[in-house]
């Protein structure tokens, strides 16, 4: 069994982005900028935003976080996004999800300029992904594809089972695999007999949020396991959705949690923001 080391690869990508920022600065006379909108006091969201901010600092981006209270109005968030859309110092706009219930999240995501949509959540970019055209791809599944490529794992013709069907993880993951010519199945909360689907998979990619959802008897010998889940166990440790201890004895490759897909997500946010800066600089002429 080999560990798919997302931490090591993310550091390599960060180095490349840092070099890219220097080159960009020499040509454009400014650095890429990322704006983050954080609503409310959710500690997990705040921790993610802090990690993203630190990563931006490490690679030399300009970054700004708009912290807003839990009871903020739709109108106030929309005004901030429109300001960021117009701001030439901002290349990427990231809305930390989830937003509070009074906010229409779809409307908010649709307001982000697609050329600044570094999370790839705008329907324009979703459509481009589904039709296999260049655009912004959600960072977590994009990071998974980079990790597979780093270990020379070609998904073409492989039976891939994606467990979890959210707009930010499962669905874009399935699209990327399909674009790379894998045979893809998507399972979710209403899937009957999950094991029936996973036990024949060459690659299982799980992003659900349920500790130990994928157990040894659900995995075929030599399968590749990508654990996208992030859960806090009773002992306070971060764990994924896979029973790592037992599944790792049976599979050929596996991502650890932490140190697998998580760091790749942040690395992809950095590379998407650099890409946005390059696109926006070209548009400015
Ligand atoms: P979500 O709640 O939006 O979606 C969960 C999905 O899992 C749904 O499609 C649901 O149908 C499915 N599901 C729930 N219970 C299931 C079960 N018992 N069997 C099969 N399917 C089931 O969540 P999300 O935002 O997609 O996040 C999923 C997980 O991925 C969470 O643990 C989250 O923390 C993690 N995540 C990790 C990263 C990362 O960087 N590694 C990024 C985003 C999300």
Image: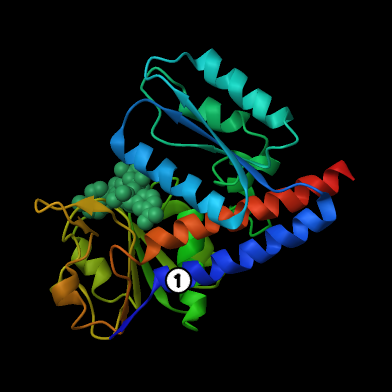
Would you say the beta carbon of the disc 1 residue lies within 8 angstroms of ligand 1? no
Report whether residue 252 is seen.
Answer: yes
What colour-coding does the image apply?
A: rainbow
Q: Which residue is mark 1?
A: 183
Q: Residues within 10 Å of mark 1 (few under 14, many from 20)?
A: some
Left or right placement of residue 259 versus residue 196 in this view: right
Q: Where is residue 275 drawn, in percent x and y? A: 69, 55
Left or right placement of residue 214 versus residue 64 in this view: left
| Label 1: which secondary element | strand
Q: Where is residue 144 drawn, in percent x and y? A: 45, 66
Q: Residue furthest right?
A: 285
Report whether residue 173 is seen.
Answer: no
Please tell me in which quadrant of the rendered image residue 1 appears. bottom left
* Location of the C terminus (image quadrant): top right
Tell me the residue at 45%/31% (across/down). Answer: 38
Left or right placement of residue 23 versus residue 43 in this view: right
Q: Where is residue 73 drawn, in percent x and y? A: 47, 13
Count the labels in the image. Answer: 1
Tell me the residue at 25%/50% (across/down). Answer: 209
Tell me the residue at 84%/56% (across/down). Answer: 27
């Amino acid at each position: 069994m080999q560990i798919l080391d997302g931490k090591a690869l993310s550091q390599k990508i960060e180095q490349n982005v840092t070099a890219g920022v220097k080159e960009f600065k020499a040509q454009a006379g400014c650095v890429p900028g990322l704006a983050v909108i954080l609503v409310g006091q959710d500690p997990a969201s705040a921790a993610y935003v802090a990690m993203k901010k630190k990563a931006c600092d490490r690679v030399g981006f300009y970054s700004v976080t708009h912290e807003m209270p839990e009871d903020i109005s739709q109108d106030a968030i929309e005004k901030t996004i429109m300001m960021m859309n117009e701001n030439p110092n901002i290349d990427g706009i990231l809305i930390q999800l989830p937003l509070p219930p009074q906010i229409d999240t779809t409307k908010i995501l649709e307001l982000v300029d697609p050329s600044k949509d570094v999370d790839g959540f705008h329907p324009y970019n979703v459509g481009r992904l589904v039709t296999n055209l260049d655009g912004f791809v959600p960072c977590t599944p994009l990071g998974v594809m980079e990790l597979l490529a780093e270990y020379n794992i070609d998904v073409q013709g492989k039976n891939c089972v994606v467990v979890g069907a959210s707009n930010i993880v499962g669905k874009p993951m399935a699209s990327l695999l399909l674009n790379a010519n894998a045979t893809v199945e998507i399972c979710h909360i209403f899937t009957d007999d999950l094991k029936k689907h996973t036990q024949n998979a060459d690659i299982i990619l799980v992003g659900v949020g349920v500790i130990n959802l994928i157990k040894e008897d659900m995995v075929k010998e030599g399968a590749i396991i990508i654990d996208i889940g992030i859960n806090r166990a009773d002992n306070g440790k971060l764990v994924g959705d896979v029973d790592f201890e037992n599944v790792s004895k049976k599979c050929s490759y596996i991502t650890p949690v932490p140190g697998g897909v998580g760091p790749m997500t942040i690395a992809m946010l950095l590379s998407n923001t650099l890409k946005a800066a390059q696109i926006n600089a070209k548009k400015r002429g």
